Amino acid sequence: MADVDVVIVGAGCAGLGAAKALRAAGRSFLVVEAMERIGGRAWTTDRDFGVPFDIGCAWLHAADRNPFHPEAVAAGWTLFHHDMGLDHLYFGDRRATGAEMARVKAADGALARAMAAHRGADDRLASLIADCHCLRANSTFAGPMDFGADDDEISIADFQAAAELDPNFFTREGFGALIHRWGADVPVTLGCPVRRIRWNGPGVEVETARGTIRARAVVVTVSTGVLQFEDIGFFPALPEAHQEAIFDLPMGLLTKIPLQVSATRLGLAPFDDLLIERRARHDLFFLCFPFDLDLMVGFVGGDFAWEIEAAGAAAAVDFATDQLVDIFGSE
């Protein structure tokens, strides 16, 4: 394979963005991607429901500074501002009372005040939620649904450092489709996994399934999850501090369970937010009928998401369906 200035490993947003920056700087580059598509975790498909569905990321968060928001506007994408407010709350199959909904809303302020006053040794977010008696519904949003981790695995410092996500926009045509459109002008070698990177100089050698590429530098954009499984070898081994950082920055997990519901709207409006609080943190959130499509998009996060992934797609669909039946009836 041809020698270039820079090899870019991975054709997600970071890899595609690096390629665009190198091209603007007049450098030669080669992007290699293990999968047969670009976009990484941004992936839109219509194979399941006949309409665009984002298997990966879907929300255009922080649209006032998100570089993909103007891209979506320029592409003519259909956008909906989603306020992430909680419209419906159930504790198991029991609907929350008006007083309980008010307590959930008040819990946000209580949690913010508790974080501002925090001086204790326990830096877990869960310690504050216990201290200020927040309802578990608040804990669910603060942890699994926002961070992909449970509140006992999130530090107060990290929670406070998180960026404000509003304004959030949801797109009918798909975030993944937008990334694919944006990156379509970048040449990418697909189906080309990297096996090892030699960086003992001069320059680097990137060993792939299609041969070795020599370059002045390599930009590795794969996730820490891929690096933790050591799918890519490094010679010499990465410094110990780098390896520790890779394992200290784990991927969170937010799993989607989309259901097609075509015969009824269950008394719910498009884009309603429905949260079902269950025991053992087996909580389930639904984005209801986005763009009035026949879809209820379920979400589970944190430790329970890992359990759901291990159980498989059929078990996930059965779980989500059972929760709706418990609330709305088997009809």
Image (cartoon, helix red, strand yellow):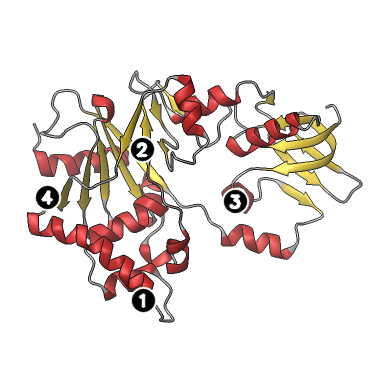
Disc on the earlier residue, 1 or 2: 1
Name which residue type carries label 2: Ala
Q: Residue 166, percent across and down?
A: 38, 45
Question: Furthest-bottom residue in view?
Answer: 120
Which dot marks residue 117?
A: 1
* Image quarter in which the N terminus is found: top right
Disc on the earlier residue, 4 or 3: 4
Q: Residue 289, percent across and down?
A: 24, 30
Which dot marks residue 157?
A: none
Disc 2 target residue: 313
Disc on the earlier residue, 1 or 4: 4
* Image quarter in which the C terminus is found: top left
Name which residue type carries label 1: Ala
Q: Residue 81, percent across and down?
A: 32, 35
SS state under label 1: helix
Disc on the earlier residue, 3 or 2: 3
Q: Name which residue lies at 41% across and 57% down.
A: 149
User: Would you say the residues marked 4 and 3 are in contact, meaning their CB atoms lie under 8 Å apart?
Assistant: no
Disc 4 target residue: 93
Nearest-to-viewer mark from 1 and 4: 1
The Cα–Cα distance between marks 3 and 1, rounded to whole angstroms, is: 33 Å
Q: Nearer the viewer, residue 121 or 227?
A: 121
Which dot marks residue 224?
A: 3
The Cα–Cα distance between marks 3 and 2, rounded to whole angstroms, is: 24 Å
